[in-house]
Amino acid sequence: MFGRERIVTAAYSCLLEQKWHTFPIEPARFHFSCPVISYQEYARLSNVSPAVFLEYGYDGFSVAGLKGQTFILYNDQSPLCRQRFTVAHELGHLLLRHQGHIRRHEEEADFFASLLLLPDAVLNLLRSRGISLTEAFLMKTFGVSRHTAQYKRAAFTRPPICHPLDQQIEALFFPEICRFASAAQSSFDELEEQYLGYNR
């Protein structure tokens, strides 16, 4: 099993460094020394067919250029939720300093991506404010696929594990969390009014 705390630290540190505080989280728009570019855009700039990149991976991959510059390439013809996860996954490989392709590294990169797109500290805070973390809510709010939402819900049934950066992540996303909690309360109030109206 991989070192959970190391991966949580990497994902949370990335969010804090980027000061990203809204949903959905868009890793392709992060400002890193590693350029993130679509197959289609890279093909346009280099006069290479996008089909060449599809041979390496349908969704995306990271590659070092001739001068040592690493790029994250992704397929912008994939569903948007898939693009987010792919870029987050590749970013995980880079920040966790993976070398080579082994199964444990893929599992770690998947875990990193799920934490980056759906931070546990944020989900805990949403749940504490009465938000039901349904599969549909996670998909719509965080812009992830059904598979990612299911993966996260399965992992989230376990007791929460505290991390030293939890409070900083909660503070970063607090205004956004309040907005969702307020919207949820407004919906509840409207339902309550309808219910009381029907029963007068």
Image: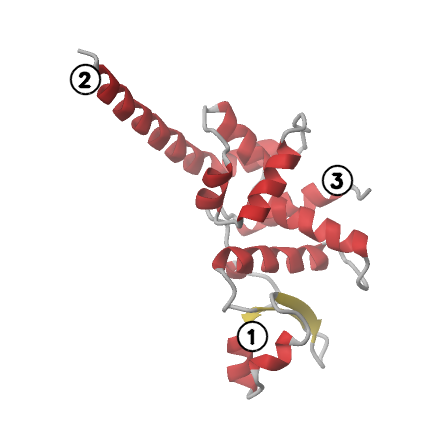
CA neighbours of label 2 inside 10 A, class few (<14), some (14 to 19), many (20+): few
Residue type at mark 1: give it: Tyr
Task: Point out residue 104 in the picture as x, y percentages from the top left corner.
Answer: 80, 52
- Which of the numbered marks, if any, corresponds to residue 39? 1
Mark 1 residue element = helix
| Nearest-to-viewer mark from 3 and 1 | 1
Mark 2 residue element = helix
Q: How far is the residue under mark 3 from the one under mark 2?
A: 50 Å
| Marks 1,2: beta carbons within 8 A | no
Residue type at mark 2: give it: Gly
Task: Point out residue 87 in the picture as x, y percentages from the top left corner.
Answer: 59, 60
Q: How far is the residue under mark 3 from the one under mark 1?
A: 32 Å
Residue at 59% from the left image edge and 36% from the top image edge: 153
| Nearest-to-viewer mark from 1 and 2 | 2
Above or below residue 44? Residue 108 is above
| Nearest-to-viewer mark from 3 and 2 | 2
Q: Earlier in the sequence, mark 1 or mark 2?
A: 1
Residue at 77% from the left image edge and 54% from the top image edge: 105
Left or right: 10 as drawn, with respect to 22: right
Residue at 68% from the left image edge and 46% from the top image edge: 111
Left or right: 41 as drawn, with respect to 181: right
Occupied quadrant, residue 118: top right
| Residue on which disc 3 sits | 4
Check the picture and name the quadrant holding the N terminus. top right
Occupied quadrant, residue 185: top left
Above or below residue 14? Residue 138 is above
Task: Point out residue 172 in the picture as x, y percentages from the top left corner.
Answer: 50, 39
| Residue on which disc 2 sits | 197
Q: Nearer the viewer, residue 136 or 68?
A: 136
User: Is residue 10 visible to us here?
Assistant: yes
